[in-house]
Amino acid sequence: MTLIDITLPISPQLPVYPGDPAVEMTLEADMARGDAYNLTRLNLSAHTGTHLDAPRHFIADGLAIDVLALDTLVGPALVVETDAPSDLTAADLDGLGIPPDMPRLLLKTRNSRRWEQPMTPVFVPDFIALRPSAAEWLIRRGVRLVGVDYLSVEALDAAPGSPVHTSLLRAGVLILEGLNLSGVTPGMYSLIALPMKLVGADGAPTRAVLIADDGAMVRP
């Protein structure tokens, strides 16, 4: 069994989505200053780095992060890779040979190459996202969780109302954003993606891990 950590490291060097607070990590107690222990204070968004979007993120009465069913967040997942030069459409997904009844789908794009470089806090706006037709494709196919390898499933130039987020979350499709898939070979894995249990929150930082069972195919 091989564990593959696909979580972005949280530090002040981590880029954040425009408008979100930058990551701050402050030593409130520091043994180097003579304190009895080290104690770090964090200031960050619930949507920092690798994180899960709950329906409440875009739906006023949607479920919060702390009440989501864990069985959606743990189980077989398919990693697919595409070299599409722009935001993914339904036609792009159709061309990836994704089997039916695939509950969890992680999309590896050119975004992942960014995570191979030294981390800088500079947000890169020309990332690969999903177009509304791709979101509708995922809903029709019964996908329960979709993961993307940059900080948003939605393009910066999306129409008002954030149609990709809204349609996915309204249909009960959870969104796992900010994955580092740079070292992941496409194929079937087991996924564990457990968000912090923040009561009433619209999202939460998440530790996401893939499990490869010594080369054996994991069945959906």
Image: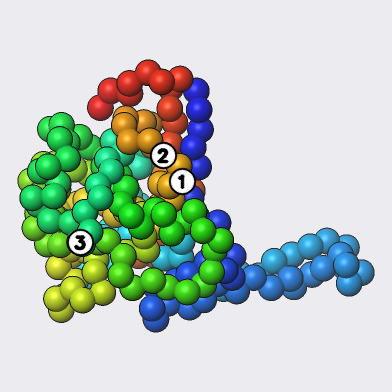
Is residue 114 visible in the rendered image? The answer is yes
In the rendered structure, are the residues bearing label 2 and label 3 in contact, judged by CB atoms less than 8 Å apart?
no
Mark number, residue 6: 1
| Residue of label 3 | 87
- The quarter holding residue 149 reads bottom left
Along the line of sight, which residue is nearer the eye, 196 or 15? 15
Which three-letter amino acid code belongs to the residue tagged 3? Asp
Front position among marks 3 and 1: 3
Coordinates of residue 103 in the picture (x, y in percent): 22, 37
The part of the image, by quadrant, that contains residue 204 is bottom left
At label 2, the amino acid type is Val
Amino acid marked by disc 1: Ile
SS class of the residue under badge 3? loop
Say if mark 1 contacts mark 2, CB within 8 Å: yes
Earlier in the chain: of badge 3 and badge 1, it is 1
Sequence order check, earlier mark of 1 and 2: 1
Disc marking residue 22: none
Binning the other alpha carbons within 10 Å of mark 3 as few (below 14), some (14 to 19) or many (20 upward) gives some
Estimate the x, y position of residue 84 in percent, counting from the top left.
21, 54
Mark 2–mark 3 distance (CA, rounded to whole Å): 21 Å
Q: Is residue 58 left or right of residue 131?
A: right
